[in-house]
Image: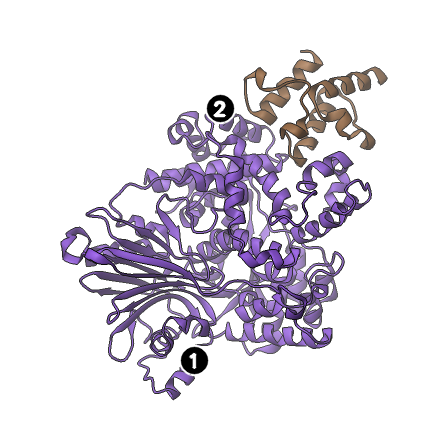
């Protein structure tokens, strides 16, 4: 991956402060240095400036950007990888295109010449692209199908403000934007409902995220104004009728899936630097590591996180896979102290408020990868969305079964099979189950049915907001994500779609993914999110998705030979890190100094996001019992500390308190 | 402090995060008012066991015993009388 940024202003020299100057482009590049420490490149035109920071992975000597077509009329800067570039290059050469480099970036300009904007359909990869067509006087910003590579933009109108600025991270836009940044409180309300802002919204007022699978086209309007449109070129799609499912015997379908997955891994090992893999101990990363071992010549090198607390640690399962595969493995062991020490820096890179501290250890992990001389890793994200792995999907299945006989006392007890801890929890009592999991039971075909219990429980954190928004606001925004045809999809398809657009796109792949990887200049690659795999898995017959309550059935069956039997059979363990404990000094039993400072009543009063007295009482409760804090309180505390930290870093633009461990 | 006062103080401080006693009506259901999430019920049980020296049996972990201040008071008083 790399960093890209740019400014477009049709007023050119008439808007003197934003006829893009090299100094401004350099400021943007400086803010993205961690994304591309290996080199920088710039392009200046009267109305346009592009900046690129490079993490060199393919064609180390020749891949400097921007890259042009044969006559220099099309320029591109690009963050990401085009994994099928060898095949595309060969085809383009046959069509008469001449290549000046060996890089994957160059196929973009030639493909664009050949196909216009439809060229995107030919790309298999992860990308944020800025493409400038000098003849057409048109700037195109394009983001990959599922949102692996980030891309943000801001539109301005006032004199002295650029008409359009874009960048891989918001901090690069902030570096040149003359107006003060403000928080979007509606985005905060959405974060405290569903973990992240919905759709294009970000926590920065006025800054949009270019949504996965879309492109923005900016052209000159009347009187040198800027006109833009955002259009979707790809989306997750599922069968709307029985004849749209794949047909064939199960064995044949599973064999096809297996060969697709092996190919998805194989093309993701293309690099002129060594490629490693994350190995969490769970099914998904184990499958990837095992494919590398058995189907490729790439030497297997793996990395993982362990925790010093038993509740979070998966070391035992990792060791099992390490022994099975005979991999050269490195592990970093995380403590709650380390999570706390990384937290401000985590917020600096994530650029948003968080409900869990789980991204922090991921940042430590990419640090280990980099330290070991690697800058590319394969990682297993996406398998749960693509193959139906989450508990939420099984929970929906049980709730639908229950909704057919709402008075049944036995049906809801199936929930105990999903959540074994319910066995020990008073919440298993019928009335409690009905309250927590019976939300929306009267309308099992409602668009958000699958997500109502989680949305209901997460939104309890909103009680700490100084001013809560209407309950319906975030829910309407989420419902608006679903395309019109979703009403004809299966319930599982709708749930998968929501999960991929909400938690995966805006949290797992960003706050916990790209941003934590790039914090240490490491690129993640995601074979399960190869669009061929997604399209194939989406059309698998429902019987191969969740069989009874056996999740990811197709993946387990297709890849059984690659795994020790126990790995495929083991219950999924959600990845989590110590939350409240990370904010409390275990020696003194008091909040870390920087936490106490950010959460002081006067600070809470100044920022005005949260009720100061409630914040104080919540922190006191965490001090009294950090280990037994419940879900709502843990999530609310992490949200408050991260939001206060975000305000400190991005609104006040102050350096992090020295005690927080954030390096300048 | 009476059982009622002690329960009220606990819920106000740990579940509602407020000093304002008028925010808690003793008859209100915790579930219906959304005062607790599923892990919050565990917290209440721990508090009751530790503060009053009683043991909440599995089959007593029911909303009828635990779902409001009024119900908790009745339940705790009964358990203390049984001791």
Q: Secondary structure at mark 1?
A: helix
Can residue A211 be seen? yes
The chain identifier of the residue carrying mark 1 reads A
Instruction: Give the image location of residue A438, x and y in percent.
Output: 70, 41
Residue identified by numbered label 1: A88
Q: Is residue A51 left or right of residue A393?
A: left
Q: Is residue A314 left or right of residue A129?
A: right
Q: Is A342 situated above or below A562? A: above
Q: Is A572 situated above or below A476? A: below
Instruction: Give the image location of residue B34, x and y in percent.
Output: 63, 30
Name the image quarter holding residue A179: top left
Q: Which chain is purple?
A: A
Residue ID at (62%, 44%): A452
In the drawing, what numbered circle is on residue A30? none
- Please name the color used to draw chain B: brown
Q: Is residue A570 left or right of residue A386?
A: right
Give the Cα separation between the discs numbered 1 and 2: 60 Å
Instruction: Give the image location of residue A4, x and y in percent.
Output: 33, 61
The chain identifier of the residue carrying mark 2 reads A
Query: Answer yes or no: do the residues labelled 1 and 2 have beta carbons within 8 Å?
Result: no
Between circles 1 and 2, the one closer to the viewer is 1
- The residue nearer to you, when weighing A369 against A267, is A267
- The residue nearer to you, when weighing B18 against A541, is A541
Residue identified by numbered label 2: A613
Residue ID at (74%, 17%): B73
- The residue nearer to you, when weighing A222 against A280, is A222
């Amino acid at each position: 991956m790399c960093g890209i940024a740019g400014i477009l202003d049709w007023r050119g020299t008439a808007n003197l402060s934003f006829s893009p100057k090299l100094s401004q482009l350099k400021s943007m590049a400086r803010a993205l240095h961690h994304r591309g420490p290996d080199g920088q490149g710039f392009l200046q035109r009267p109305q346009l400036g592009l900046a690129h920071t490079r993490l060199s992975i393919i064609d180390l000597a020749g891949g400097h950007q921007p890259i042009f077509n044969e006559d220099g009329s099309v320029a591109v800067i690009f963050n990401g990888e085009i994994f099928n570039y060898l095949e595309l290059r060969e085809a383009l050469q046959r069509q008469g295109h001449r290549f000046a480099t060996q890089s994957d970036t160059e196929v973009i300009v030639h493909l664009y010449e050949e196909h216009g904007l439809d060229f995107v359909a030919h790309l298999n990869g992860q990308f944020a692209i800025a493409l400038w067509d000098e003849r057409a006087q048109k700037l195109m910003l394009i983001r990959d199908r599922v949102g692996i590579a980030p891309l943000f933009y801001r539109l301005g109108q006032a004199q002295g403000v650029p008409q359009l600025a874009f960048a891989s991270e918001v901090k690069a836009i902030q570096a040149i934007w003359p107006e003060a940044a403000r928080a979007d409180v509606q985005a905060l309300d959405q974060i405290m409902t569903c973990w992240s802002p919905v759709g294009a919204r970000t926590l920065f007022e006025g800054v949009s995220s270019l949504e996965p699978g879309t492109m923005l086209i900016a052209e000159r309007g009347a009187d040198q104004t800027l006109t833009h449109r955002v259009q979707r070129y790809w989306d997750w799609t599922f069968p709307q009728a029985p004849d749209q499912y794949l047909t064939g015997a199960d064995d044949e379908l599973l064999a096809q899936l297996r060969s697709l997955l092996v190919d998805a891994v194989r093309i993701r090992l293309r690099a002129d630097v060594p490629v490693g893999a994350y190995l969490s101990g769970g099914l998904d990363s184990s499958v990837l590591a095992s494919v590398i071992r058995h189907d490729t010549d790439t030497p297997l090198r793996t990395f993982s996180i362990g925790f010093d607390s038993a509740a979070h640690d998966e070391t035992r399962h990792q060791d099992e896979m390490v022994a099975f595969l005979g991999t050269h493995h490195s592990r970093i062991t995380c403590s709650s102290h380390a999570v706390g020490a990384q937290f401000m820096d985590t917020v600096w890179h994530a650029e948003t408020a968080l409900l869990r501290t789980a991204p922090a250890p991921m940042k430590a992990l990419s640090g280990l990868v980099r330290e070991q001389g690697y800058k590319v890793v394969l990682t297993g994200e996406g398998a749960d969305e693509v193959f139906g792995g989450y508990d939420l999907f099984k929970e929906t299945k049980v709730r639908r079964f229950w909704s057919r006989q709402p008075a049944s006392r036995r049906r809801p007890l199936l929930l105990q099979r999903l959540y074994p801890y319910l066995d020990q929890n008073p919440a298993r009592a019928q009335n409690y189950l009905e309250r927590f999991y019976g939300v929306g039971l009267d309308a099992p075909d409602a668009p958000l049915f699958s997500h109502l219990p989680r949305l209901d429980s997460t939104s309890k954190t909103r009680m700490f907001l100084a001013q809560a928004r209407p309950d319906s606001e975030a829910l309407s925004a989420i419902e608006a994500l679903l395309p019109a045809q979703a009403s004809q999809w299966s319930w599982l398809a709708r749930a998968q779609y929501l999960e991929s657009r909400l938690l995966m796109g805006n949290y797992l792949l960003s706050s916990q993914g790209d941003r934590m990887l790039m914090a240490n200049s490491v690129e993640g690659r995601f074979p399960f999110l190869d669009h061929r795999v997604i399209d194939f898995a989406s059309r698998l017959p429902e019987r191969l998705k969740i069989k009874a309550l056996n999740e990811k059935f197709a993946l387990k069956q297709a890849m059984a030979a690659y795994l020790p039997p126990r790995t495929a059979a083991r219950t999924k363990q959600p990845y989590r890190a110590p939350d409240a404990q990370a904010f409390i000094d275990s020696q003194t039993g008091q909040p870390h100094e920087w936490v106490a400072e950010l959460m002081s009543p006067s600070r809470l009063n100044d920022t005005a996001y949260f009720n100061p007295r409630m914040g104080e009482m919540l922190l006191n409760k965490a001090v009294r019992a950090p280990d037994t804090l419940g879900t709502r309180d843990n999530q609310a505390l992490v949200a408050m500390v991260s939001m206060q930290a975000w305000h400190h870093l991005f609104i006040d633009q102050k350096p992090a308190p020295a005690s927080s461990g954030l390096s300048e | 402090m009476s059982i009622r006062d002690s329960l009220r103080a606990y819920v106000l401080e740990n579940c509602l995060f407020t000093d304002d006693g008028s925010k808690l009506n003793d008859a209100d259901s915790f579930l219906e008012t959304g005062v607790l999430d599923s892990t919050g019920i565990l917290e209440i049980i721990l508090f009751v066991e530790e503060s009053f020296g009683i043991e909440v049996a599995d089959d007593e972990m029911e909303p009828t015993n635990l779902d409001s201040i009024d119900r908790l008071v009745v339940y705790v008083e009964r358990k203390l009388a049984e001791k």
